[in-house]
Image (cartoon, rainbow, N blue to C red):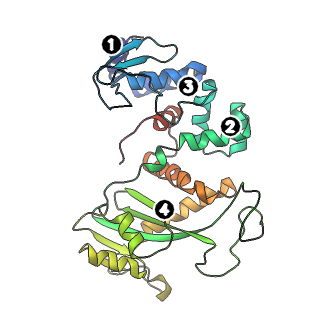
Amino acid sequence: MEHEHFQALVDQLSALTKEQRDAIVEAVKSRASATDAVSLIDARFSMAPQCPHCKSKNVSTWSKPKPLTRYMCKDCDTTFSALTGTPLETLRRRDAWLEYAQCLSDGVSLRRAAKRCKIALDTAFRWRHRFLEIPKNKKAKALSGIVEADETFILKSQKGVRNIVGRAPRKRGGKASKPGHSDELQPVLIARDRNGATTDAMLDKVDGDAIKKNLGGVVQKETLLITDGEKAYAAFAKAYALLHVWIIVSKGEHVWEGYHIQNVNSYTSNFKTWMVRFRGVATKYLDSYLGWRRRIDRDGDALPAASWLAAAVADAATS
């Protein structure tokens, strides 16, 4: 289908009733096949093709779909397609991409994804992190109004490593051998405003430098920052001249003058509950799962497969 015909079809969709649009969506889903994944990527890219090498939009069509349209950049004289420079560029079995994107939407385990897509388990693992490579870096660039920040701790894991250094192997999950915030736990900073914009970061340790590095420039001026009693937040708030409220749960405080950190605590709790299905995640891949969960929180837990496919190859705007 030519670009102008495709656009005309899109324009006509606004005249349909909700029931008719839903019927079309279901029809498209039922007919999704091997080439549909590539066609979806190609059609989306064709709306505004841009050279991945020099970012120029001064491009022309070089060849028609085979199955992807190839373009020529008039500024740097290179050719490219919608997949050039994306995490999916070198992956094979394109016939299974759309079904795998649906697995991400459904949040299934690697084994279930491999079975559904009829691919090897190690392929399912590699694809998961390729599909999440862009979403994991899509964080809120600005938090404003009332911002809640808190740190959580997740048991470090060397899942997949044959020769574990520093400790004896343990069953998946498990508990830290020491009470408190020991070096067996990975600190994760999570910050959210009341509009749902979220950012997070894996920290080496919870201190002033780490908080400034990850929240400086993100938390906007004239923001009210609400945190627990960690002193690093106080130092950050003072450095950036932010109003700051402490909620010290260890002293029995949960709400002060109507202020609380239940928003960020609820997000953290939901994240940890959601992670249980994966039966332990290697710490080196934790940022991918943080990004996965942020996208679900931002866009809903019933995203269509095509949406995950688009997120895997495009720099979609961060909310």
Residue at position x 67%, y 39% from top?
124
Nearest to N terminus: mark 3 or mark 2: 3
Tag 3 and tag 2, C-beta contact below 8 Å:
no
Task: Identify residue for label 1.
Answer: 4
Task: Identify residue for label 2.
Answer: 123
Label 4, label 1: how far apart the Cα atoms are: 43 Å
Locate residue 176 relative to residue 310 in the image: left or right.
right
Relative to 71, is 219 above or below?
Answer: below
Label 3, label 2: how far apart the Cα atoms are: 24 Å
Using the rendered image of the protein, determine whether residue 48 is visible from the camera's viewpoint.
yes
Which mark is drawn over residue 267? Answer: 4
Q: Residues within 10 Å of mark 2 (few under 14, many from 20)?
A: some
Residue at position x 39%, y 62% from top?
192
Give, as a three-letter code, the residue at label 4.
Tyr
Q: Residues within 10 Å of mark 1 (few under 14, many from 20)?
A: few
Task: Identify residue for label 3.
Answer: 29
Nearest to N terminus: mark 4 or mark 3: 3
Nearest to N terminus: mark 1 or mark 2: 1
Q: Which marked residue is nearer to the observer: mark 1 or mark 2?
A: 2
Nearest to N terminus: mark 4 or mark 1: 1
Give, as a three-letter code, the residue at label 2.
Thr
Locate residue 255 relative to residue 217 in the image: left or right.
right
